[in-house]
Image (tube, helix red, strand yellow):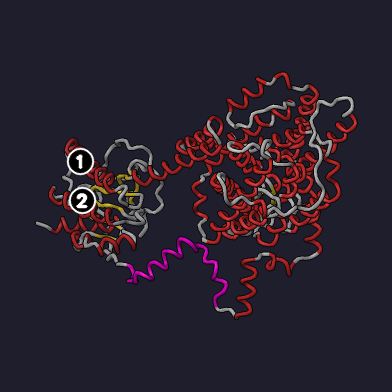
């Protein structure tokens, strides 16, 4: 049973030299094919829902436990801090303090920079690096995820909101929409986790994300040319041509002082990143570079401000903790739909990044991250953040990589980072007054340039052309149309690929591997032999309404081509078609009807149709639809080998 279960997609079909086996098949015991145990509709529904929503069986630890143990396990399930908290010690704290302070040196300048990228006040970026990490440290299950604002979500939020509302002309309304979008992003994320619908984000395939992130990164880099060149009047649009025309139309605003400073710090930042990549032990060089750049550039501008007033600076940043913003949530008005749409799209993107980053580092340390639990943690983090002057946050790959390399042991490193941000908010904000905008642009360019993964795109081209097409659609859609539409086009291409596989499943002709009972593709295995008078076909997909017509036409075409080949080579007449059903995991009523019609059509042509190794659910559907009765006692076999042996012996027994 299952002898053909390891087949992979075949090469394109081409005719091969036919060899007829001269030796007879070895004697083989014939087994009956059994129906699965009977279940009620309620039992089937319960099992199916369990497989869909609870594949990991999260409640298995609660079985056969006392009520107190169940209460403790429940607390650990919803609040992972109760799981690792009792075992926490000073040794772990030392490691977490070092890693927490290290990522804080990266989070502070990145927080300010990414807020500017989202067209928000820089202080909002620091607020978003304080409250969300504290919430995640209680609810999150990843030990290495470093939480805060990220470039892609910042870009998408800025581009979508700026299309309808200007952050400079209506700053209060823009801020309200940003907080409201964050709230809806959190509600959407938490709902996916609570209802265990995380499979929805799987429609953002890896190929789609590679293209999307590359396209978004190019747009981000082009947008930062405003800061690098010192341009004051710049377009708020995100399309490639709009940005480029704005750059060259405002050549008179270019500042050579800003360009020189930006170029110097870009070289510095890229050099430090290269050092950390080539020598992983020096990870702290790249981690400390952004904050070092901010300090040095701020000091330079402070001393040169009287002589060179051409370099724009951040200006005043208010001191103090996050002010409450629940009164600023925008739940009624003409822009509510925009806030909801922005929240859902940024929520999906940030959730995809956060869960993927958490699983990446969990795999490196051999522990498991619960995807649904992460969705709830990130969602609740954003809901609380929207009420405390924060915008969309998630797990950042760059900060998480630094956190991992710095030796973080638990999520306490997020608490240490938040504490460092708290000290900055309370006491150090005046020091950022003279921080030049050009250094923020340089930090963003350095961070997002790492998201352009041309090697991954090349691998897609080598392995799967349709995946590469989805990647390119995403890339060019973001670059030349808009960020949301580019993403929608790429998702559409990915869904088209799924539909293509479903509606046009793979079929192949099988032959016998000599001296075995194994049957494999004639194209793939040159030693595989055709069995005289038999046509053995394999179907490698579930049989649904969407592909029944195609499968029927394709099987009849295989039969016609086999008869033509037999006639041309003067071989034994075709008598039997065997369908290997090993890879057919499911069938619907359209599929059972197709099987019935196909059997009748072949029967009129004096050809016998036989099924080999149908799985339990398929067997049950065929039996319930009465299709199985039309196949008779010798119409279903456990394996292809048994079908060939039994039918051949029956032919020999006939006069």
Q: Is residue 299 magenta?
A: no
Identify the secondary structure beneath mark 2. helix
Q: Position of residue 339 (x, y in %)?
A: 58, 46
Which residue sits at x=74%, y=22%? 254
Q: Quadrant of residue 432?
A: top right
113 displayed left or right of 46:
right
What residue is disc 2 on?
598
What residue is disc 1 on?
560
Taking depth in this image into account, of 54 and 329 the one nearest to the observer is 329
Residue 233 sits above or below residue 642 on the image: above
Identify the secondary structure beneath mark 1. helix
Q: Which portion, as a residue range, is magenta?
A: 36-63
The C terminus - image quarter: bottom left
From this viewpoint, is residue 379 visible?
A: yes
422 displayed left or right of 518:
right
Q: Quadrant of residue 224?
A: top right
Q: Quadrant of residue 163?
A: top right
């Amino acid at each position: 049973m299952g002898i053909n279960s390891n087949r992979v997609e075949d090469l394109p079909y081409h005719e091969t030299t036919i060899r007829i086996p001269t030796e007879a098949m070895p004697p083989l015991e014939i087994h009956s094919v059994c129906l699965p145990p009977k279940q009620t509709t309620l039992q089937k529904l319960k099992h199916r829902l369990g497989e869909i929503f609870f594949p990991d069986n999260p409640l298995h630890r609660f079985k056969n436990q006392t009520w107190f143990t169940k209460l403790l396990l429940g607390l650990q399930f919803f609040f992972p801090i109760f799981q690792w908290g009792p075992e926490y010690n000073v040794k772990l704290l030392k490691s977490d303090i070092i890693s927490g302070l290290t990522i804080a040196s990266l989070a502070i300048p990145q927080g300010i920079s990414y807020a500017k990228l989202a067209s928000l006040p820089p202080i909002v970026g620091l607020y978003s690096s304080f409250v969300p990490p504290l919430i995640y440290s209680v609810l999150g299950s990843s030990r290495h995820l470093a939480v805060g604002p990220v470039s892609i979500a910042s870009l998408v939020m800025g581009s979508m909101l700026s299309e309808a509302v200007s952050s400079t002309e209506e700053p209060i309304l823009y801020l309200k929409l940003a907080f409201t979008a964050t709230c809806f992003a959190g509600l959407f994320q938490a709902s996916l986790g609570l209802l265990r619908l995380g499979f929805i984000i799987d429609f953002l395939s890896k190929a789609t994300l590679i293209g999307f992130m590359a396209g978004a990164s190019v747009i981000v880099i082009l947008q930062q040319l405003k800061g690098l060149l010192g341009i004051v009047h710049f377009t708020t649009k995100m399309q490639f041509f709009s940005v480029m025309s704005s750059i060259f139309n405002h050549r008179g605003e270019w500042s050579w002082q800003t360009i020189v400073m930006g170029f110097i710090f870009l070289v510095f930042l890229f050099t430090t990143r290269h050092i950390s990549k080539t020598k992983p032990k020096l990870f702290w060089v790249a981690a400390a570079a952004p904050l070092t750049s901010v300090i040095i550039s701020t000091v330079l501008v402070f001393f040169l401000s009287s002589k060179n007033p051409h370099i724009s600076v951040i200006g005043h940043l208010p001191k103090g903790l996050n002010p409450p913003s629940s009164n600023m949530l925008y739940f009624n008005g003409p822009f509510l739909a925009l806030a909801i749409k922005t929240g859902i799209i940024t929520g999906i993107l940030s959730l995809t990044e956060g869960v993927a980053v958490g699983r990446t580092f969990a795999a490196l340390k051999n522990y498991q991250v619960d995807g649904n639990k992460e969705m709830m943690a990130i969602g609740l983090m954003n809901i609380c953040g929207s009420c405390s002057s924060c915008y969309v946050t998630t797990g950042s790959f760059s900060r998480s990589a630094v956190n991992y390399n710095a030796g973080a042991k638990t999520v306490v490193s997020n608490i240490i980072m938040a504490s460092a941000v708290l000290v900055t908010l309370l006491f150090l904000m005046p020091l950022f007054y003279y921080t030049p905008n050009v250094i923020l642009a340089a930090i963003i360019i350095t961070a997002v340039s790492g998201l352009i993964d041309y090697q991954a795109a090349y691998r897609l081209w080598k392995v799967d052309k349709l995946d590469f097409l989805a990647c390119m659609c995403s890339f060019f859609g973001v670059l030349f149309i808009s960020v949301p539409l580019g993403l929608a086009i790429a998702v559409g291409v990915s869904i088209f690929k799924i539909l293509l596989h479903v509606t046009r499943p793979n079929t192949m002709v099988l032959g016998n591997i000599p001296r075995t009972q194994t049957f494999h593709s004639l194209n793939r295995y040159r030693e595989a032999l055709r069995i005289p008078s038999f046509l053995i076909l394999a179907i490698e997909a579930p049989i649904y309404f969407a592909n029944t017509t195609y499968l029927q036409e394709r099987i009849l075409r295989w039969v016609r081509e086999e008869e033509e080949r037999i006639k041309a080579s003067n071989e034994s007449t075709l008598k039997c078609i065997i369908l290997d059903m090993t890879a057919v995991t499911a069938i619907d009523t359209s599929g059972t009807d197709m099987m019935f019609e196909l059997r009748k059509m072949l029967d009129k042509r004096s050809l016998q149709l036989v099924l080999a190794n149908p799985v339990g659910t398929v067997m049950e559907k065929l039996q319930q639809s009465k299709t199985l009765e039309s196949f008779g006692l010798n119409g279903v076999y456990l394996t292809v080998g048994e079908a060939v042996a039994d039918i051949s012996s029956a032919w020999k027994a006939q006069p």
